[in-house]
Amino acid sequence: MSAPRLEIDLHKLHHNARTLVELLRPRGIQVVGVTKAVLGSPEIARALLSAGAVGLGDSRIENIETMRRAGVSETLSLIRSPMISQADRVVANADISFNTELDVIAKLSKAARRRGNVHRVVLMVELGDLREGIMPDDLASVVRETLCLPNIKLEGIGVNLACRSGVAPDDANMTVLGFLVESIERTFGLALRVVSGGNSASLTWALGAANTSRVNQLRLGESVLLGCEPLQRQPIPGLHTDAVTLVAEVIESKSKPSRPWGDVGETAFGMATPASDRGRIDQTILALGHQDTDPAGLRPPPEIELLGASGDHLVVASRCQLAVGTELRFQPNYSALVRAMTSPFVENVLKAESVSMQTGREISATQ
Ligand SMILES: *Cc1c(COP(=O)(O)O)cnc(C)c1O
């Protein structure tokens, strides 16, 4: 197999998704599986659906088109506000889109009318994280106008927290969401089908709250893929944290001084971090760099220490010299995962078997 490569274990992803679906079900919350980090992989999409996700969400129309072309027929939501220039593609491929701009919804309405279908919209409301969302005071007027647009159905209200400013979902902001939902329903005499209470960062709140108010949906990506919640990056009990691993190959292995010599200025990717003098160390270079992933987001195997990275090289210290050709297996965080998925140099390998494929020459971050 070629390196570097991302190995994704479909059984472990299925287990993670199923576990979250079952934890949330008694709380009246359904799961939309979020596929953007895996570029709308149809195999992963199917694993999430078979685990009980009620639909899939993606931020890119290209990924939604990939899933449609592969024959995924379940409900697909575009979870980033559509570009107005892509309204036709959105209406053609997504059942639902998440919106904050009336001009865009009007364009979706026109496009849907031309196609003779009905496009469903979820209106996103701003509750403090300062990314997407209609300010709460403006929500009623946006709802009023949305309801007037032909071929558009108001599916619900949603919120996104934590991604930009790290604002945690809690009883306070979720109660505000519930009030907004009820006030819209009362004012306009309608029932909102969806109250979408956020992403993986909402799990801690949703699983711990005495009352999850009107929230009946979460959109989950990172927690399914990496088995952790994004606010404290803690593992979620019962989930696999090693469903996704990044494998790289050793291209140099030498005993070298631990400190550079000569005049030291900036490095290829910013300032050098001063190295402590530990005498000579076993320094290993892997064929993996900033063009492949986010090196700072890699968890190395035991007894391997990350020392530095450049565009094409990852420099590590090891307990003993590793032969060239040895493969090391790292656990990527979300940043490292999305960079690796979008790098043309990193192969993706989907494993349908959870049996370990470790060879004698491979050292793994996962026990
Ligand atoms: C990325 C994203 C999600 C999924 O977030 P995770 O933290 O990966 O679960 C949900 N909703 C929106 C709007 C997103 O952009």
Image (cartoon, rainbow, N blue to C red):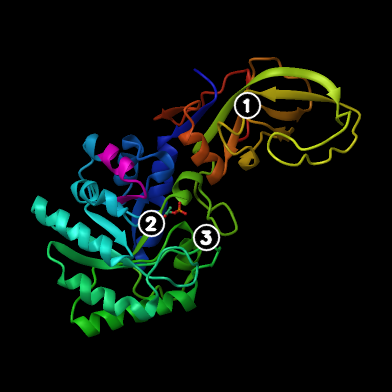
> How far apart are the alpha carbons under marks 3 and 1?
29 Å
Q: Which mark is residue 337?
A: none
Q: Residue at x 18, y 82 (%)?
A: 189
Q: What residue is shown with label 1?
A: 312
Query: Up-down: is 225 above or below 258?
Result: below
Number of other residues with Cα within 10 Å of mark 2, as a class: few under 14, some 14 to 19, many 20 or more? many
Q: Nearer the viewer, residue 144 or 225?
A: 144
Give residue 164's mark.
3
Mark 2 near ligand 1 (CB under 8 Å)? yes
Q: Which residue is mark 2?
A: 219
> Between residues 158 and 228, which one lies in front from this camera angle?
158
Q: Residues within 10 Å of mark 1 (few under 14, many from 20)?
A: some
Placement of 312 over or under 37, stated as above or below: above
Q: Magenta stretch: residue 65 in it?
A: yes
Asked which secondary structure carries label 3, the reply is loop
355 left or right, relative to 149: right
Residue 54 in view here: no
Q: CA distance from mark 2 to mark 3?
A: 16 Å
At 39% from the left edge and 39% from the top edge, which residue is drawn? 39
The question of residue 103 being in magenta is answered with no
Q: Quadrant of residue 125?
A: bottom left
Provide residue 281's location: percent of width, then percent of height. Answer: 84, 26
Closer to the camera: disc 2 or disc 3?
3
- The CA distance from mark 2 to mark 1 is 34 Å
Which residue range is magenta in the image? 54-67
Question: Considering only order in the chain, which callout, 3 or 2, is on the residue closer to the N terminus?
Answer: 3
Give the amino acid type for the residue marked by disc 1 in the picture: Asp
Single out the residue that lies furthest toward the left. Answer: 116
User: Where's residue 319, x and y in %?
Assistant: 79, 27
